[in-house]
Image (cartoon, helix red, strand yellow):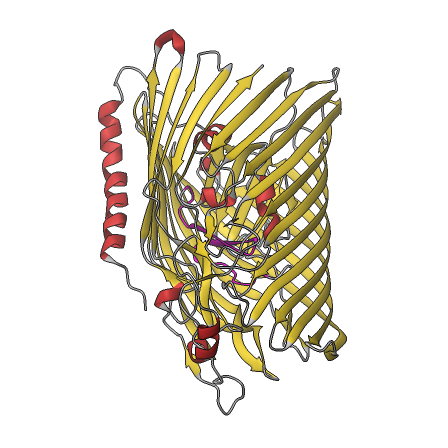
Amino acid sequence: MKKLTKKGLLAAASMVSLIATAPHAMAQAAPNDTAATGVEEIVVTAQKRSENLQDVPASITALNEKALELRQIGSLSDLQGQVPSLVVGNLFGTNLITLRGISTGLTSGTDDPSVATHVNGAYQPRSRSIDVAMVDLERVEVLAGPQGTLYGRNATGGAVNYVLRGPSDELEGELTGRVGNYERYGVSGSVSGPLGDKVGIRVTGLYDNQRKGFTRVLNANAPKDRLEEYRVIGGRAIVEFKPTERLTVSLEGMALNTKSSTAFFPFAPSLDPAIRAASNPQSYEAHEVYTDVDAKLNSEYYQGIGTINWEISDNVSLKSISAYQDYNQLMVIDSDGSATAPFRGPTVQVTDSKTFTQEFNLNASLLDDRLKSLVGFFYFYDDVDLTTNLQIFSTGTLGFHTFQKARSYSFFTDHTFSVTDNIRLIAGLRYNHDKKTALQSFAITLANGTVVTVLPPTTSDVAFDSWTPRVGVQIDLAPDVMAYATYSKGFKSGGFASNVTAVNPYEPEKIEGGEVGIKSEFADGRVRLNVAGYYYDYSDLQVQSAALVNGVSVFRVRNAATSRIYGVEAQLQAVIADNLRLDVAGMLQSAKYTDFTTCNNTAFLGACGSAATSTLVNVKGNWLNRAPDYTVNVGLEYDLDVGTAGKVTFRAESFFSGRVFYDEFATPLLSQKPYSLQNAFISYSPDDESFTLRAFIKNIGNTDYKTSAFFQTSAFQQTGTWGAPRTFGAEATVRF
């Protein structure tokens, strides 16, 4: 069982020390006679209306365009460290997001995430497509904790909102070129401006190519000498029409084509002596692998969004968001991490999904602005076609096929009432109805060509209903100090799991709990300190359990676990001097199973095939998967004024993480020990900001760290993926 380590306590103590001493330092730094430049104000739409970040009774991290560009945030994984409780892993192209210890280990194309992601208000159902949102970004908002009232299904851990740029009032454009190590180069650009008095347009293009992958292939006969290379080509266009002062209609489209590759990366030899002998050689070092497969991880993503904003009156507005997404992915991956394919050949998986969503939000400010009300409706239509072929050389080819339909609708309402000028009450409720239908089949093509049907095409239907409330109170303790307490519920939709001979549904996950926090600004606005504490009961966790069914090793998804999570997180932003800024984001938590009886997969060889021989263990007290006990990120920025020539900005940051377990058994090899990453950035712009030069280096110490790990039952081996090594590069942006 994991304990708070000495390094973790030191990191947490450092965070507390910085937070505790910052107000005094700022009070000394701020002149008494004039107001110094303060922390930048950020407006967010986390509650589906525009508000100052400090007025929202929830833990939110918001990064604006300037911060995103300076810190070179171009993917979801780059947000780790910027958000106190965010942990990001990646497995076979699936982004595994953890917020406050809440995550999912389900990676199938039909599975649901535990953190809801939206792009310009449009829900993104595929965890595999989340990074496509990192194009033309204006702002990122991350809400921690259950968001079942405002965001509905699959927001048990929180929500990530990507806000993309709209058309500008004047004609403008920019062009950026970039280069980096691993033979990376790319270019992006945009043009924006009005077309007459009532129409605005923005067009963006992107090309990014890293020709040399992070992972070196060791065997000479491999189809590729590197893996984890990538190439991205994409574009986005938005047209905004404003026929009247109170009505705005926008249409936008996005297309992205990505080509990459990945593999299983073994951490240790197979537990099966025969496979271990036949798999030789294998590498267990970071960013090294043996393979005999032409690996691919290619995807195409298309999205269209139509948004209508209608200000019905000064106090009432209606917003409609209609969105359609088409996502396709081809994955070809080496399943055994060896050059000779003794046991498993390539796994080939094809995913084709089509999604339509519709949301209406009616906002009203009533009773002389004392009551802010929201009433909304959401509809979700999703079709996923998933085919997986796994070659087992001693047997043949295993073929799985799943076609899943998901339909969902919900009604929700949320209200904030000002009892007095300083006290506000919060109440909200959401009803959600989910229905899913799955058609699944499973067959084995033997080595001699004979096809054995194990599971003929079988259909199953399930439906789920849920009520997710939110209640709370806000109190203004001082002009720039607000305290709040909220209670909320959330749920993650259920689904289907094939155990080879049948289609078995699993139930939704449920979470409920509370959050208390304080948001404050002081020292003439030079210091912003936000602190939140949380406690959750997390039940019916959807987990994968190892089993042998008819001699075939499979993972079955079932509701088998309960857990308890509690912790505290803090964010500090401070202007130490007019040109010097400090930011700290940290979290300290406990996230443990309170009950989970499962098959011990470390003794999986012949041990879990039947009830008579099963090796069962209750992992009560073990830490939840992908839930560190602490994270701390410390950043320091300095602006060097070079007179009429402009300004140079330097930024250095260091991220510290506690131990992360990737399985429920607290297996040391399937975990990442405490580690730290250091990054540095520099940018230069003249006074007129007509161009910007930037350079960066990430993971300065070239630290090896795991982003996912699991026990691969077919090869009886511990395997997973590694985080990015040291990367560096430069870019230049020209504006007109």
Instruction: Residue at 60%, 63% (x, y): give it.
Output: 346
Q: Tell me: residue 195, above or below residue 128.
A: above
Residue 577 in percent (x, y) is at 28, 23
Q: From the image, which quarter does the N terminus lie in? A: bottom left
Between residue 712 and residue 216, name the one nearer to us. Answer: 216
Point out the residue furthest to the top here.
644
Place of residue 94 in the rendered image (x, y in percent of width and height, measured from the top left): 56, 54
From this viewpoint, which residue is outermost toward the front?
A: 220
**As rendered, which of 434 and 10 lies closer to the eye?**
10
Q: Which residues are magenta?
A: 82-107
Q: Position of residue 645 (x, y in %)?
A: 39, 10
Q: Is residue 563 left or right of residue 127?
A: left
Against 186, is 162 above or below? below
Does residue 296 appear in the picture of this structure?
yes
**Residue 57 showing in the rendered view:** no
Which quarter shows the C terminus? top right
Q: Residue extending furthest bottom? A: 612
Q: Is residue 209 left or right of residue 251?
A: left
